[in-house]
Image (tube, helix red, strand yellow):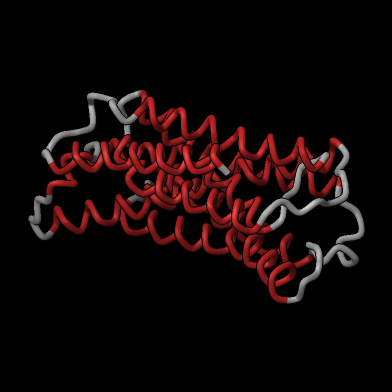
Amino acid sequence: MTIVLIAVALYLLAAALLIVAVRRDARPASRLWLLPAVTAVALHAGAHLLAWHQAGGADLHFFAALSLVGLGMAALTAIVGASGRMAALGVVVFPLAALTLLGYQSYGHVRTETLDWRLQLHAWFALLAYATLAIAALLAVMLWLQERALRRREFHHWLRALPPLVELETLLFRTIAVGFVLLTATLLTGLVFVENLLAQHLVHKTVLSLLSWLAFGGLLLGRWRYGWRGATAVRWTLVAMALLVLAFFGSKFVLELVLRRPS
């Protein structure tokens, strides 16, 4: 429990340092937030590893998977933010990661059957894809807010913490491209390695994930072929992400927490 509380405190400290920088009308270039953020990410990962070691195996129940996605989002934010781009994203991501870690700690470790390396590979591809595309969804929301504020000539403090509009849009599509590759790997490994889809209640996950994959792929194609941007990019990104959330966390929530059945 101590390691979790320290990680949560460091996540909140990193977010607070970023908020102070934003309120001072400056981009968080000092990187004072980076040390607590990186330490929190390391402790977050350590909390999972310690729980898995004590229980004799990894688990991917609803709250564990949610915490791992939060961990992935925090790690990606720290990596991208360290390069001087979109550090302000941590204002949202770090408290969210802290919340998912607390949820995992509160629910506790659930021992499950040990997965072979093929299913583990599929699961890790899925978690990385969700984390990356969740970052893309947050970037899409920020892009929409930035465009809306600029159209209305509302020059808020937080606008100064964001990259220029074109740079933010470029970062959005690069993030989507990476997430799309990871989601493709998730679907391919699932197709090759997962058997008995009906028996394992995975049909709905597969269909929703495929629809999300088509939506993200269509957005990237539209960007390349027709130069889609702005509101169109935001809508496609959020719809595709909503489908992905329903595919994994929606189904896990219903099966594990409502119906009390393994997913």
* Residue at the image position 36 percent from the left and 43 percent from the top: 12
Quarter in which the N terminus is drawn: top right
Q: Is residue 174 left or right of residue 178?
A: left
Instruction: Estimate the x, y position of residue 115 in percent, counting from the top left.
Output: 86, 43
Q: Position of residue 112 (x, y in %)?
A: 83, 52
235 sits left or right of 102 in the view:
left
- Where's residue 173, x and y in %? 43, 41
**Picture coordinates of residue 118, whole percent (x, y):** 84, 38
Residue name at image x 28 percent, y 26 percent = 32
Residue placed at 41% from the left, 41% from the top?
9
| 70 relative to 229 in the view: left or right | right
Q: How many marks?
A: 0
Relative vertical location of residue 233 with respect to residue 32 in this rendering, above or below: below
Q: Is residue 98 above or below residue 21?
A: below
Q: Nearer the viewer, residue 122 or 95?
A: 95
Q: Residue at x 47, y 47 (%)?
A: 98
